[in-house]
Image (cartoon, rainbow, N blue to C red):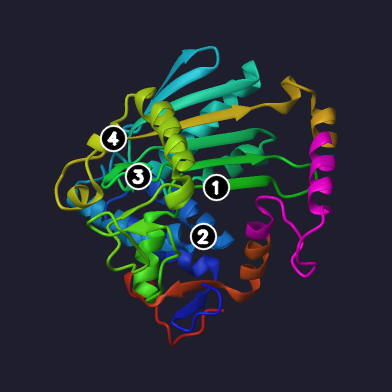
Amino acid sequence: MNGMTNVHYYPEAVLSRQVKAQLVQAGAQDRDADATTRALLHASRIGVDSHGVRLVGHYVRLLQTGGINPRPSTVFERTGPATGQLNADGGLAHPAAYRAMDEAVLLAREAGIGAVGVHHSSHFGAAGAFVVEAARQGMIGLIMSNSDAAVSLFGGAQPFHGTNPIAMAAPVKNSDPWFMDIATSSIPFNRVKLYRSLGLPLPAGAAADNSGYATQDAVAASFLQPLGGEDFGFKGAALAGLVTILAGALTGAALDPVMVGTDEEQNSRKRQNVGHFVIAIDPARFVGQAAYDLAMGSYLDLLRSSPSVDPQHPVMAPGDREWAEARRRIITGIPIDLETERALQLDGSKSYL
């Protein structure tokens, strides 16, 4: 949202306080509200505003209507030397995903790799929030999640897969992690909603209207196209299927095409049964810690010194842009659109910086 005039800027501490207060007031347990706030601020901090604090209103509505269980009894079961299953009991997904990653890291400390499936969860926002935690503990973290149908198949005329994100973080000695967080759709649907609130047109090849025709009108957009768009969307559709298999079929979660839809979830007491699949890998148990650190350093040096088409815009590693934005927002504050500002009960005329 850089350069937009219809936003106001707030420090992270103010947003964190307001987000948690909204969740607790809606019935969330204190520890669940803490974890959810932490995940939302991760996204807002690094510039992924579509999945940041603007989502708090969505979670509040679900807590109030019963679409999310405000008092879940999350249960983790170890199923093997390096595997486990976590039942999120219909609660907020963010604490469940953090717990799954913590359990996967513990498994990896024993076995070198740990994998945890999560079922009966819900929308977990920006997937990257959870893999960063693994990297901070010296582990490579990988997470993916399925979701309700919002993306067409390649050449399809109706939604079939969810946006099905995949995120990974790899630790880098004395530096921020290598960091990737992508949807297998052209864009996340929350970006469509953000563009609606900002009055912006969508990128070409990102979405389709009710009839299945491509549109750049955020208001007219009914569902998304897979990553790769009209010409190469078979790649995104296949990746979405990979996520559905690992996060849905393997965990016991609902499959994308038959999962309770977001609109139905918001307007009834039905719950989605979203699935996540989490992996933690200990580099020391493969090539060895010293060799891994050396290889990652060499790889990133080679990458960042690779020539670019435009000398004014050097090539960057995944995560470079996000970590730079996080450092910038410490100074400028986090931009909040007016709709989110009202939802958080913030006063845009007041200076919080």
Kindly report the distance in space between the C-alpha atoms of the residues bearing marks 3 and 1.
Answer: 25 Å
Q: Which residue is mark 3?
A: 155
Span shown in magenta: 295-323
Label 2 is placed on what type of residue?
Answer: Val
Quarter of the figure with the C terminus: bottom right
Please state which amino acid type lies under the numbered disc 1.
Asp
Q: Nearer the viewer, mark 2 or mark 3?
A: 3
Label 1 sits on a secondary structure element that is strand
Magenta-drawn stretch contains 11:
no
Q: Residue 311, located in which quarter of the rendered image?
A: bottom right
Separation of disc 3 and disc 4 at Cα? Answer: 28 Å
Foreground pick, 203 / 95: 203
* Mark 4 or 1, closer to the camera: 1
* Residue plotted at (48% across, 79% down): 8
Point out the tag, 3 or 4, that comes first from the N-terminus.
3
Pointers 1 and 2 in contact (CB under 8 A)? yes
| Mark identifier at residue 181 | 1
Name the spot of residue 258 as percent of width and height, x first. 23, 35
Comes first in the chain, label 1 or label 2: 2
Q: Which amino acid lies under the numbered mark 3 shown in the image of this protein? A: Gly
Quadrant of res 260? top left
